[in-house]
Amino acid sequence: MDVKGTRRTKEFYNSQGWKTVDSGTTLDVDLFGVKEDGPLRRAMFERMWSRIEAYLGPQAGSEVLEVGCGGSPELRLLETFDNYVGADFSSEGLGVRG
């Protein structure tokens, strides 16, 4: 598979994307916003979560792996599952605390 931009994307996030900027957020948020921006994105996000929760339901000892969490893990995963692991190619992003 020919994946374009991966090296440059990794370099961006490791060097500056997950750094805190003057606004108090990360450069990633300043440039791209957050996952829940706008009414349509919110509606799609809630629909996605209702499907996930309906499919999985509450399960004791449930585990989830979020791949590509960067410096902004999906907090709802932390609330939904008993065990959470976030993974990202950007070691800088994994060190961000929100």
Image (spheres, rainbow, N blue to C red):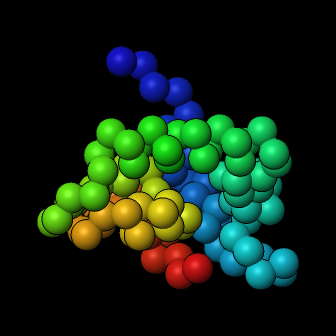
Left or right? Give the position of 88 relative to 73: left
- The number of numbered badges drawn on the structure is 0
Please name whichever residue, 81 or 2, is drawn nearer the observer in this view of the structure.
81
Please name whichever residue, 58 or 88, is drawn nearer the observer in this view of the structure.
58
Quadrant holding the C terminus: bottom right
Quadrant holding the N terminus: top left
Residue 64 on image: x %, y %: 27, 56
Left or right? Give the position of 53 relative to 13: left
Q: Is residue 21 above or below residue 40?
A: below
Residue 21 on image: x %, y %: 77, 76
Please name whichever residue, 86 or 43, is drawn nearer the observer in this view of the structure.
43
Q: Is residue 32 above or below residue 71?
A: above
Q: Residue at x 29, y 46 (%)?
A: 56
Q: Residue at x 69, y 70 (%)?
A: 26
Q: Residue at x 36, y 54 (%)?
A: 66
Residue 50 on image: x %, y %: 49, 44
Give residue 23's quadrant in the image.
bottom right
Q: Is residue 88 above or below residue 75?
A: above
Residue 9 on image: x %, y %: 57, 45
Left or right? Give the position of 54 relative to 22: left
Please say whether residue 14 is visible from this viewpoint: no
Please say whether residue 59 is visible from this viewpoint: yes
Left or right? Give the position of 2 relative to 59: right
Give residue 16's quadrant in the image.
bottom right
Q: Residue furthest left?
A: 61
